[in-house]
């Protein structure tokens, strides 16, 4: 059994933990995380997108009381909100919504920022609302997967996550393959996102999501590939 000092963030480097976690099965990684951190120190967010059910299922098996934060940009598809409700009931999730500032959201709506100022729109409605929560936690569980993009393929299981890296990012399924993901969802009979069967490989906000394979339908034709939550 690996043992760690009480304040692991201050005494260990993320690279050290990444090396130790690589040999563990996916679910075991999450179990060991809670040997290092208290539940209230763990920030868990979910977009309730096409790949979300897998990690939600894993975490709910290990720590059913873990709160799940959903950033409601107010630009989500109705199907995503319905999917959130369905998974929440199925997995008995404790979901709390994170909302953008009403004033800043109205600024985005009034100026149609999603048309030409995608980065600003994402920052105001998704990135900025999460900052206070990041400041109150020590580690952030993410569902990033290396196969999804070249940028994500260069990540490690543990990474610094901003705020002077006072919080770490933990990606327990980073090295899971697309086929492993598919098989896991089939084995546990996890329902797909309603838009997935309609040709949406990845689902974000209404204005910036189109039908395509993988993440190719996000911000299509703009050169933008990430919202800014995980990459500045």
Image: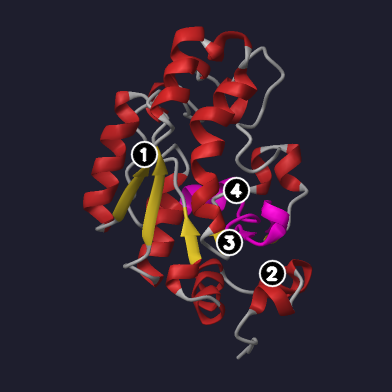
Q: In this image, 55 relative to 190: left or right?
A: right
Label 4 CA crowd tier, 10 Å (few <14, some 14–19, many 20+) = many
The Cα atoms of the two marked residues, 2 and 1, are separated by 28 Å
Vertical placement of 18 versus 213: above or below? Answer: below
Q: Secondary structure at mark 3?
A: loop
Which tag is nearer the camera, tag 4 or tag 1? Answer: 4
Q: Earlier in the sequence, mark 2 or mark 4?
A: 2
* Residues at discs 3 and 1 in contact (Cβ within 8 Å): no
Q: In this image, 114 relative to 101: left or right?
A: right
Residue 201 picture location, percent across and down: 51, 29
Query: Residue at point 30% right, 33% down?
Result: 81
Residue 203 picture location, percent across and down: 47, 29
Which quadrant does the C terminus fall into? top right
Magenta residues span 159-184
Vertical placement of 216 versus 33: above or below? Answer: above
Label 3 CA crowd tier, 10 Å (few <14, some 14–19, many 20+) = many
The image quadrant of residue 22 is: bottom right
The Cα atoms of the two marked residues, 3 and 1, are separated by 21 Å
Most distant residue in the left direction: 89
Most distant residue in the front direction: 103
Q: Is residue 218 visible?
A: no
Q: Which mark is residue 144?
A: 4
Q: Nearer the viewer, residue 63 or 201?
A: 63
Q: Is residue 179 visible?
A: yes
Reading the image, the residue beneath label 3 is 172
Query: Residue at point 51% right, 50% down?
Result: 132
The Cα atoms of the two marked residues, 2 and 3, are separated by 9 Å
Which quadrant does the N terminus fall into? bottom right
Q: Is residue 181 magenta?
A: yes
The Cα atoms of the two marked residues, 4 and 3, are separated by 8 Å
Reading the image, the residue beneath label 2 is 22
Reading the image, the residue beneath label 1 is 192
């Amino acid at each position: 059994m690996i043992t760690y000092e009480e304040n692991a963030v201050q005494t260990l480097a993320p690279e050290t933990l990444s090396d130790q976690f690589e040999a563990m099965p996916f679910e075991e990684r999450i179990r060991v995380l809670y040997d290092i951190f208290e539940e209230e120190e763990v920030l868990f967010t979910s977009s309730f997108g096409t790949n979300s059910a897998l990690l939600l299922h894993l975490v709910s098996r290990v720590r059913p009381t873990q709160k799940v934060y959903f950033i409601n940009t107010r630009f989500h598809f109705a199907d995503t909100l319905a999917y959130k409700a369905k998974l929440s009931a199925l997995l008995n999730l404790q979901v709390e919504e994170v909302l953008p500032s009403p004033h800043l959201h109205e600024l985005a709506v009034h100026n149609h920022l999603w048309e030409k100022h995608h980065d600003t729109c994402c920052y105001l409605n998704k990135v900025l609302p999460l900052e206070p929560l990041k400041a109150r936690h020590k580690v952030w569980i993410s569902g990033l997967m290396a196969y999804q993009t070249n940028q994500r393929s260069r990540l490690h299981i543990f990474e610094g996550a901003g705020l002077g890296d006072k919080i770490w990012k933990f990606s327990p399924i980073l090295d899971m393959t697309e086929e492993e993901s598919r098989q896991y969802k089939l084995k546990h009979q996890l329902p797909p996102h309603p838009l997935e069967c309609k040709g949406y490989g990845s689902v974000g906000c209404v204005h910036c999501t189109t039908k395509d394979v993988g993440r190719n339908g996000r911000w299509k034709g703009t050169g933008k590939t990430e919202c800014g939550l995980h990459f500045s």
